[in-house]
Amino acid sequence: MELAFLYESFLESRSVTTDTRKVKNGDLFFALKGPNFNGNTFAATALEMGAAYVVVDEAEVVQDDRYVLVDDVLTTLQQLANLHRRTLGIPILAITGSNGKTTTKELVNAVMSKKYKTYATVGNLNNHIGIPLTLLAMDESIEFGIVEMGANHQKEIASYCSFVEPNYGLINNVGKAHLEGFGGFEGVKKGKGELYQYLFETNGIAFINSKNEHLMEMSPFEAPVLYGRNSDFYNAKFLKSDPFVAFIAGNEELVETKLVGDYNFDNILAALCIGKYFGVPSIAANQAIEQYDPTNNRSQIVKTEKNEVILDSYNANPTSMRAAIENFASLQKENKVVILGDMYELGEESEVEHANIGALLNLLTDTKIILIGKNMAAASKECTAAAYMDTKEAAVNFLVSNQILNSTILLKGSRGMGLESLMPLL
Ligand SMILES: CC(=O)N[C@H]1[C@@H](OP(=O)(O)OP(=O)(O)OC[C@H]2O[C@@H](n3ccc(=O)[nH]c3=O)[C@H](O)[C@@H]2O)O[C@H](CO)[C@@H](O)[C@@H]1O[C@H](C)C(=O)N[C@@H](C)C(=O)N[C@H](CCC(=O)N[C@@H](CCC[C@@H](N)C(=O)O)C(=O)O)C(=O)O
Ligand SMILES: Nc1ncnc2c1ncn2[C@@H]1O[C@H](COP(=O)(O)OP(=O)(O)OP(=O)(O)O)[C@@H](O)[C@H]1O
Ligand SMILES: C[C@@H](N)C(=O)N[C@H](C)C(=O)O
């Protein structure tokens, strides 16, 4: 009953917010609880600021009939999103994976929007709150929805599938990310595999990189749409990444991208496979890939007055760190510097995984290495040639007195390290 009423008012306003700092006239305000605040305490403020209704789950804050009291605000937000998704009835593609979800989502969106009116997750709004907000932002003009799903524990992807109800899905890869919450690499496979399980049980379709043995082993499908090998539904030929990726597309066209890192080739293949499956003309699809220019701290090239920086400070885990280092090692540049920060959420595997990165760095004989953060101590023990600072503050002092000039720099670490704040020194 509450849901039907809320959906009616949602259809009138088309605007949902969870934050009084962003309320607009006519909004539906959902009073979520978070680590810092209880949204119920902001309900009255939301109404004063123009919200039409406030959805709360604490009876004592209710003052009049503009308060909609429910058992649990987050569950109601997800149920409303599900009702909207069913009403729209459009095809929805879910994208998850350990690395490259956001980039792949952007690439798929760029390709698919050459033929369809699409809506894709904005930025990284990929969790229990961001995903329902993504669904509710789709209107009747949208022909194809693309929903990024992030996760750091079991049953999370299954829960998202239950209200997103995707018809199509892509697990980009499985790697050593969020090991703490997933319970190791096998746990990552199980947790991400929940998308395959949902699609299998609902006769959905999965796009799978056939060169990825883990994904192939996880696949329960009889006939998934494969990419990556010549006999597959889609393939392309990698040419180089020096630093930008170039390749020969499935239609034999040369495509020169603005994406750094050979690992991005897999993300591109996924996008082009999906485009081909949905009938996007190949010339237009290739053009979409060529035009995509990352500006989001994810392997972004920044030319400063002093240096050229591969700014990769959005996140870091053993798999993406290794991929970034190996790619950097292959670059033909004069003065190379690697600045790496801690990798987070690795639980009991943290020390050994940081040590493994240290061992890998020993292979970079022509490169200056700077390691930052408490966890990187384990890497510095393996890689004795590296300069090591346990805090970012210490690293700032080091970089002030040891200026880096005329170099190509890889700057990568977990989000919490905020390594982009070092950019003014580089
Ligand atoms: C709940 C919420 O939306 N919080 C946002 C809020 O946080 P704030 O610091 O204010 O505190 P609370 O969370 O405690 O607030 C509770 C509610 O109170 C509201 N409120 C507060 C103050 C006020 O004056 N008025 C208010 O109304 C408040 O809005 C809350 O509703 O603001 C922050 C700053 O803008 C936001 O950063 C914070 O957003 C949280 C983090 C959030 O989850 N936002 C989602 C929309 C989202 O999708 N965020 C993504 C990050 C996704 C992510 O990390 N993905 C991981 C994997 C997923 C793991 C999953 N299990 C998980 O734990 O999330 C990945 O690896 O990709 C993003 O922002 O990019
Ligand atoms: N296919 C890939 N394999 C390994 N590493 C990758 C791949 N694609 C991207 N990366 C690395 O991951 C970084 C973050 O990319 P992106 O934000 O697209 O991933 P994500 O999975 O969405 O991350 P998050 O969950 O934190 O949003 C990139 O800058 C790059 O270093
Ligand atoms: C920021 C969040 N999406 C994420 O990726 N976290 C990990 C732990 C990181 O920052 O490396």
Image (cartoon, rainbow, N blue to C red):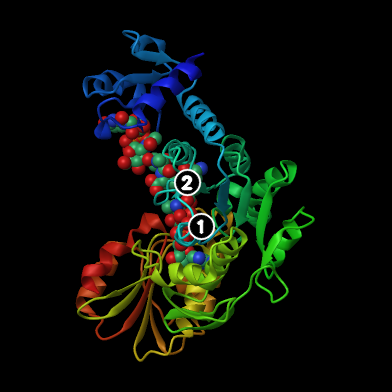
Instruction: Give the residue drawn at x 57%, y 49%.
Output: 94
Which residue reaches farthest top?
A: 64
- Position above or below: 26 against 148: above
**Amino acid under label 2?**
Asn
Q: How many marks?
A: 2
SS class, disc 2: loop
Give coordinates of residue 301: x percent, y percent: 34, 73
Of residue 227 and residue 426, the one placed in the foreground of this image is: 227
Are the residues flagged by discs 2 and 1 in contact, CB closer than 8 Å? yes
Picture layout, residue 27 above or below residue 110: above
- Could you tell me residue 265's position as x and y percent? 53, 73
Answer with mark 2 or mark 1, whichever residue precedes in sequence: 1
Residue matched to label 2: 126
Please report the residue visible at 49 percent of the width from the left and 22 percent of the height from the top.
72
Asked whether the viewer can see residue 316, the reply is: no
Q: Is residue 409 visible?
A: yes
Question: Along the line of sight, which residue is nearer the eye, 209 or 301?
Answer: 209
Which numbered disc covers residue 101?
Answer: 1
Q: What's the residue at 54%, 56% (across, down)?
A: 346
Q: For this view, does 298 lie left or right of residue 194?
A: left
